[in-house]
Amino acid sequence: MEIDYSNIKVIGFDADDTLWVNETYFREAEEEVGRLLSHYETPNKIDQELFKMEMKNLSTYGYGVKGFVLSMIELAIELSNGSVSNEIIGKILDIGKNMINKPIELLDGVEEVLKTLSKDYKLIVATKGDLLDQERKLEKSGLLDYFHHIEVLSEKQEANYDKLLKHLDIKPSEFLMVGNSLKSDILPLVNIGAEAIHVPFHTTWQHEKVNKKDTNGLEYKTVESLSDILNILK
């Protein structure tokens, strides 16, 4: 069944891995910390334990680079039974600083899409992560002028989106969300009566993966690139 977008007045965009590259840097950091701690455990085991540590700490630190770095440090202390050197701790801190200072690499077609859609729709950013880091990335991206509103959410669940839409006085039937994560950007919106378009990124954080049964019966569109949206909303 063809999805009707004729009622859409506001389009929300996820930021990380939808507008610019992000997850790639986390994968690179995981490989780097795996090498740093390789005399304590195998790289595969370190990767598994780091994910467990991140999940344990999510409710304390939230999403983003800072929580990731604290989890890496805690893991280093745990794997070494408290004997990890100051030098390694310092190198882990440097990994985090390097991630924060990465240049913004916009994904293909982003500026063209925003420039075109901003003529006919109100555009907002709805992302999650560390507030300061997300604000910094948006400023560095050069995209701020296209957006009417920026919202950094602690979580991307139905209740969070419902609260955001009510705050902005947007009806779910008039809202379209665009993002790379089925779990965070697509399924919650469809479940509250909004529309959603999935633009997959080439790598997905384990925490954002969903089972196929979670998407059964839900209507949303998947496109290969952000530019494809222009053909859908013409």
Image: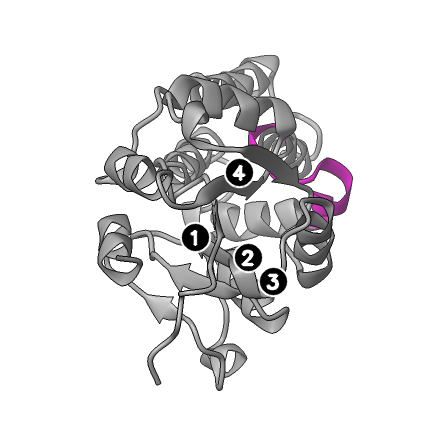
Say if the magenta span includes residue 64. yes
**Residue 114 image position (x, y, % from top left):** 34, 38
The mark that comes first in sequence, 2 or 4, is 4
Q: How is the image coloured?
A: one colour
Residue occupying image coordinates x 51% and y 23%: 96
How far apart are the two marked residues, 1 and 2, measured between alpha carbons? 8 Å
Instruction: Tell me the number on the disc at residue 172.
Output: 3
**Residue 174 image position (x, y, % from top left):** 54, 60
Q: Residues within 10 Å of mark 4 (few under 14, many from 20)?
A: some
The mark that comes first in sequence, 2 or 3, is 3
Residue occupying image coordinates x 76% and y 46%: 59
Q: Which residue is mark 2?
A: 184
The mark that comes first in sequence, 1 or 4, is 4
Residue 92's place in the image compared with 218, above or below, is above
Mark 3: amino acid: Pro
Residue 185 vs residue 54: left or right?
left
Q: Are marks 2 and 4 in contact (CB under 8 Å)?
A: no
Residue 6's place in the image compared with 144, above or below, is below
Q: Which residue is mark 1?
A: 179
Q: Which residues are magenta?
A: 56-66
Mark 1: amino acid: Gly
The mark that comes first in sequence, 1 or 3, is 3
